[in-house]
Amino acid sequence: MGDIQALRGTRDILPDEVGYWQQVEATAQQILTRAVYQEIRTPIFERTELFERGIGEATDVVGKEMYTFSDRATPPRSVTLRPEGTAGVVRTFIERSLYAQGGVQRLWYTGPMFRYENPQAGRQRQFHQLGVEVIGSADPRADAEVIAIATDILQSLGLKNLHLTLNSVGNLEDRQHYRQALVDYLTPYQDQLDPDSQERLSRNPLRILDSKDKRTQEIAQNAPSILDYLGSYSRQHFEKVQQLLSNLEINYQLNPRLVRGLDYYTHTAFEIQSDDLGAQATVCGGGRYDGLVAQLSGPDTPAVGWAIGLERLILLLQLQKLPVSLLDFYVVSRGEAAEAQALILAQKLRHSGFSVELDLSGSGFKKQFARAERSRAIACLIIGDEEAASQTVKLKWMASKEQQAIAAVDLLAMTDDLHQQINTFRATQ
RNA sequence: GCGAGCGUAGCCAAGUGGUUAAGGCAGUGGUUUGUGGUACCACCAUCCGGGGGUUCAAGUCCCCUCGUUCGCCCCA
């Protein structure tokens, strides 16, 4: 092995896997386009301050996971590889005055994100997200729409064993009240909490709720629920979201202890998890972030969004589906004239919409047939000296082993028929 | 940042401290060269992630290091 390897936590997506990515991208694009969401592409690095202010200084993402470095400007500025997509989209929204167009911005994005964490199943340092942001609506229907689109995408890909978990974290005021109540409740148990949670009691008590420590969980069991501390607006909003989801026949489970790790969330918070992943089971996470635009010095604008972890999604896809053969014809040829004609034929068939692989090995027919078999082509085209001399080609259907001689011009004249036959064979695969 | 496991060819993988490092898949060439997945033959690791140590002797034991996997924290 060479001495230069891909960096820890990064990986190459090789051709045998890339079909899954294309499938996900195509499916998502179709669903998003129908819902009239528009793609937006923002830089993969930004000023560090954007993330510090947007995501929150106290969060783990900002505190210990950012790829931050100085650039070559004088004086150098601190830049960071984006750890998530929302902050950049909101920055553009403000900087390019997208709000001036009025109405609601429905945006989506996809691309690499970077977090300096230790890799494990479903977690890398460079990973990819597909995300959606609806900026400019506080309406519960926006929450429901966004969730419905996420479930549509996942369902269209044929994923099973997924669960939607829902919570509301209220607005800032609700959370302050709740936070106080929680601290009041937990303080008497302070000594019994796990060390991490003791730490968090002053910094970020909400997160004690989903600690995995056994004793801490027991204590958290009886802690006050945030749902009891929602003000009337928050409560109504949340109830409306639930009702809308029910109307859409989207199943969900309430979890008052669902707390998301980024500071900017308000009201609706949700996760979609899978039974079939390891410890990192969340495929999609999101929620409402009504305060973020204002916090980044834009006009006070409500927003909802989510992000899907593409690596996790593809892990699931690989568990349940085999990609079907994309190859229509494998072209076998031998002899100078035949090889030349085979190339021409392959090109012409491609122009007619077929996928065609030309055997370039120059080895014997037997080996070429073996490769044709392995290529999982629907049919094989054979051109040898005889065929070259008579301007014909042998067409062989791999599944049935039926073979017929046919004039090259006739073959090219019957492309509609061929497409139909290939589709028939493919359907029976 | 922390914890545990693992590191033998492109991939999977065997290998009580003792001489030339099983096997399978894939690959390449061939079986007197025009018909395939499941025939046969040959070739395919001077070397067991790297470094140091113990020993007459190390892929096999010890230490360090790097990589990797899974988990913790947290998240997608």
Image (tube, coloured by chain):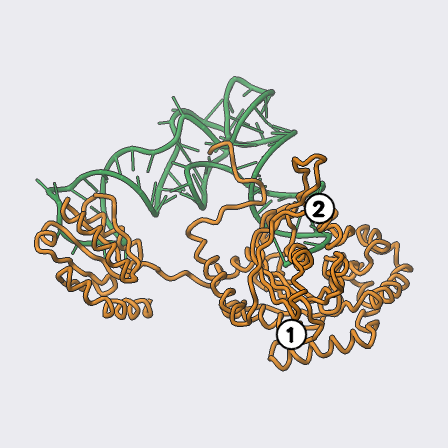
The orange-coloured chain is labelled A
Residue displayed at 72% across by 67% down: A302
The green-coloured chain is labelled B
State the CA–CA distance, disc 2 to disc 1: 32 Å
User: Disc 2: which chain?
Assistant: A
Residue nearest the observer in this picture, A407 or A48 = A48
| Label 2 vs 1, first from the N-terminus | 2
Q: How crowded is mark 1: few (under 14 residues within 10 Å), some or many (20 or more)?
A: many
Residue linked to disc 2 = A48
State the image coordinates of residue A68 (x, y, percent, origin top left): 68, 42
Residue nearest the observer in this picture, A148 or B21 = A148
| Secondary structure type for disc 2 | helix
Residue linked to disc 1 = A144
User: Disc 1: which chain?
Assistant: A
Residue sitting farthest toward the front:
A100
Residue nearest the observer in this picture, A418 or A155 = A418
Residue displayed at 11% across by 49% down: A385
